[in-house]
Image (spheres, rainbow, N blue to C red):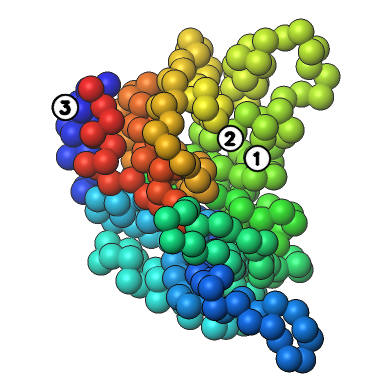
């Protein structure tokens, strides 16, 4: 795909309506100046002084940020946050993201804690930021049925008004986040209706529970969750992916790290796109979310699978070269990597 063709597709992005249902979390970066280290009088342990705090929506919020960078015209987050300090920061980040973001389907509830990644960074002059052990805030109890019901009501009301729905399941403990069994059943119901919007699902640990919608996984997730346990070891990986796409009746995108991305769909030949060469230090955080956002926007704008993968690989290359943050890729940055 040429830069000119990409610009032709991107010209349609402003008219797209995309809903993002999933686990919205707060990414809180704590910048530490090692030169200001102290020793605690009380414990005798080292005190690391935070000199700057940066917060931004993460998880599904990273996908939202990438769609904003692409100029998508209407974006509706469907999810929840807690009524806590982190939730206030997350809501502020979502409200500040852009006028095209509609929060009328985003729930604030005292029955959930705001999913938060606190990321301490050692900042040394002339060196990339060094990320220390993360501090995570998660939910360890099941999402109340009343919240899942409200999320399903939102999805049903949005289904006829959107061009695409992105589904991101970010939690490790089943049923503790936004993408519960009830929400998956609702998405199955929507996908089966005539004129249903494009639905693209992404999950760290539950992709095998998703209904027959388009899926994006990495190679490790595919082997762990989608490849049949009885698959003979001598069956080529591409053949395994194509077999799963056929049996699940879905379009399946599989990212392969430095080897790029491939797509298998029922009754179609597999297609693949290589990754761009690395151009210095990299940070892969957020690359998968950039791929998800760009696949969805391009496909919703009537790109072919191959064109969508080309855009996604260019976006991933942009993002991994942005250090110390969960970056996004703009239309201009993507276009610059295309012939």
Pick out the residue farthest to the front.
35
Residue that label 1 marks: 207
Q: Secondary structure at mark 3?
A: helix
Q: Secondary structure at mark 2?
A: strand
Crowding at label 1, few (<14), some or many (≥20) Cα neighbours within 10 Å?
many
| For discs 1 and 2, the disc positioned in front in the rendered view | 2
| Residue 222 percent across, percent down from the top left | 66, 30
Question: Which quarter of the rendered picture does the C terminus lie within?
Answer: top left
Crowding at label 2, few (<14), some or many (≥20) Cα neighbours within 10 Å?
many
Q: Residue at x 35, y 33 (%)?
A: 314
Q: Which mark is residue 217?
A: 2
Residue 179 vertical placement versus 41 (above, below): above
Residue 261 vertical placement versus 127 (above, below): above
Proximity of marks 1 and 2: CB atoms separated by less than 8 Å: yes
Using the numbered discs, state the Cα–Cα distance from disc 3 to disc 1 in whole angstroms. 35 Å
Q: Earlier in the sequence, mark 1 or mark 2?
A: 1
| For discs 3 and 1, the disc positioned in front in the rendered view | 3
Using the numbered discs, state the Cα–Cα distance from disc 1 to disc 2 in whole angstroms. 8 Å
| Residue 109 percent across, percent down from the top left | 58, 78
């Amino acid at each position: 795909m040429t830069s000119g063709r990409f610009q032709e597709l991107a010209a349609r992005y402003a008219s797209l309506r995309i809903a993002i249902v999933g686990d919205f979390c707060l990414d809180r970066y704590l910048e530490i100046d090692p030169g200001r280290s102290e020793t605690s009088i009380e414990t005798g342990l080292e005190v690391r002084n935070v000199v700057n705090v940066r917060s931004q929506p993460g998880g599904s919020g990273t996908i939202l940020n990438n769609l904003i960078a692409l100029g998508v015209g209407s974006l509706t987050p469907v999810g929840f946050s807690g009524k806590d300090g982190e939730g206030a920061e997350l809501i502020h980040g979502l409200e500040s993201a852009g006028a095209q973001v509609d929060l009328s389907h985003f729930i604030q509830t005292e029955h959930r804690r705001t999913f938060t990644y606190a990321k301490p960074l050692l900042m040394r002059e002339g060196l990339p930021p060094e990320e220390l052990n993360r501090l995570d805030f998660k939910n360890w109890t099941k999402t109340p049925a009343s919240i899942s019901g409200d999320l399903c009501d939102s999805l049903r009301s949005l289904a006829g008004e959107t061009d695409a729905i992105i589904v991101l399941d970010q939690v490790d403990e089943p049923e503790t986040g936004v993408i519960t069994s009830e929400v998956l059943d609702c998405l199955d119901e929507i996908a089966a209706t005539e004129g249903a919007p494009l639905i693209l699902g992404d999950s760290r640990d539950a992709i095998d529970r998703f209904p027959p919608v388009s899926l994006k996984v990495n190679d490790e997730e595919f082997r762990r969750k989608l490849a049949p346990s009885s698959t003979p070891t001598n069956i080529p990986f591409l053949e395994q992916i194509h077999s799963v796409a056929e049996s699940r009746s879905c379009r399946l995108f599989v990212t392969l790290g430095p080897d790029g991305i491939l797509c298998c769909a029922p009754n179609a030949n597999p297609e693949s796109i290589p990754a761009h060469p690395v151009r210095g230090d990299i940070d892969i955080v957020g690359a998968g979310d950039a791929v998800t956002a760009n696949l969805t926007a391009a496909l919703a704008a009537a790109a072919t699978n191959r064109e969508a993968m080309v855009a996604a690989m260019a976006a991933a290359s942009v993002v991994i070269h942005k250090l110390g943050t969960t970056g996004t890729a703009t239309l201009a940055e993507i276009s610059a990597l295309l012939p």
